[in-house]
Image (tube, rainbow, N blue to C red):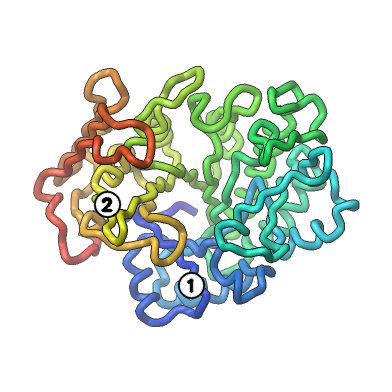
Amino acid sequence: MGLVFCVGRAPHLHCSIQTTPYCCKQIAEIGKYSMAILGWQHLVDATDWTASVYAQLAQAAILKGAHPHLPVFVYAGFGWGFGMNAAVQPLMAQPEGYQDWFLQSTDGPEYTRTNCNQMHSNNPHCVGWFWKFSNASARTYFVEKLVRPLATSPMIDGVFFDAFNYGYEIPQVRPFGRSVVNVPNCTHAGGAGCEALLSGTLDVARRTTELLNANGKVPIFANPAAFFEGIVGAGDFYLDERRLLSSLEGLAWMTYCESARAEQVTKPESGTTNVSALRNMLEEGRRGVAAGVHAYYQRNGTQLEDPLPHVAAFMLVREEHWYYFGSTGWLDSDWAWTALYDLRCGRPAAPALALGDSQLAYTRRYEKCSVTLDCTHARKGLAAVQHCFASIEGPGSIAMPSIETL
């Protein structure tokens, strides 16, 4: 199953996390977008952080009933597992029996409190541990107990899997500075044993995709790999995206690039390749990889910044089955419609063309407009967007009152 690309309709995602059932206004608003994802935050308080994704399925059915052609996804962790998941919590409750299913430090499991911090919660189920995908039993449990119930759910079209890279990168990342000690011959500096995490992650990715595809669904893998080292992972913790494509050959799936503001994706990454994320996305498009691209907007008080540079960056790389995320965060109030999403530029008429050798400036022609982005003077960082010049010119650049397909 592939995701439908809508001509003349900005592929934009809306992640809804309201803690009350959808009202008619919410349902209509979400229907304006080309895809909907129910984030992990959705219904966590209403369910006391217990099996919330299954409660979300009923709301997904409401969305599908109102918008049958709207792809609807739910969230699941990939490299990490949280106690809020019904299949993970029993393992965390008996750590002595499943110790080797998760990455361990000298004084217990490697852990994250990112969900706790984001929602200002001390609920014990907000804590997450990191899967040890070099363990075959852990891999099978993940596919059968986490993926299969969602794969067989008729009211969704796929699953957004967060933190794919944490399936293999955690020994190098070292949350809270704590070293991983239960992967033989693999330390924060690397080692031959780190390959077991890489190959295990690829095995889980393929089995997950096969299971979802067999049930008419598609996975979205967040930050899984890169064609150029240094963009996602480095050294013995680098997963070459060619390996991922080879592992998933013949299957339907999507990648997701986070932190895709204009000045971020055009800036060459540090490392051995010195290649920008935008160059990596261009390579993904050339190879037919479906993708979602997320730019985090800024607000100055109540004033939202002009998203033009970030939309322009997306339009440079946009291909069939590509979607754009634009928000200040992951809560309902962080997503707002702008006139840019109503543009009718049509299909791309040519690939993006680099302007000079810096990787910081590009232009691209569409059927009814042309897009230019120049971040030559931008610094990589959230405060520098005003230094990126962007334009969308031509008859398709006039915002229209409707987003219906031409």
Taking the image as shown, residue 375 lies to the left or right of residue 60, namely left
Q: Secondary structure at mark 1?
A: loop
Tag in front: 1 or 2: 2
Q: Amino acid at mark 2?
A: Glu
- Residue shown at 20% from the left, 54% from the top: 343
Looking at the picture, tell me which residue is in the foreground, 241 or 382.
382
- Residue shown at 15% from the left, 61% from the top: 400
User: Taking 40 as reference, is 174 above or below it?
Assistant: above
Q: Which mark is residue 273?
A: none
Mark 1–mark 2 Cα distance, whole angstroms, equals 24 Å
For label 1, the crowd category at 10 Å Cα-Cα, with few meaning under 14, some 14 to 19 and many 20 or more, is some
Q: Quadrant of the C terminus?
A: bottom left
Q: Position of residue 365 (x, y in %)?
A: 19, 37
In this view, the residue farthest toward the right is 96
For label 2, the crowd category at 10 Å Cα-Cα, with few meaning under 14, some 14 to 19 and many 20 or more, is few
Q: Which mark is residue 18?
A: 1
- Residue shown at 60% from the left, 43% from the top: 164
Q: Position of residue 242 (x, y in %)?
A: 54, 29
User: Taking 129 as reference, is 148 above or below it?
Assistant: below
Q: Position of residue 255 (x, y in %)?
A: 49, 44
* Residue 190 image-quadrant placement: top right
Residue on which the image places disc 2: 305
User: Taking 191 as reference, is 215 above or below it?
Assistant: below
Is residue 71 visible in the rendered structure shown here? no
Taking the image as shown, residue 257 lies to the left or right of residue 366, namely right
Q: Amino acid at mark 1?
A: Gln
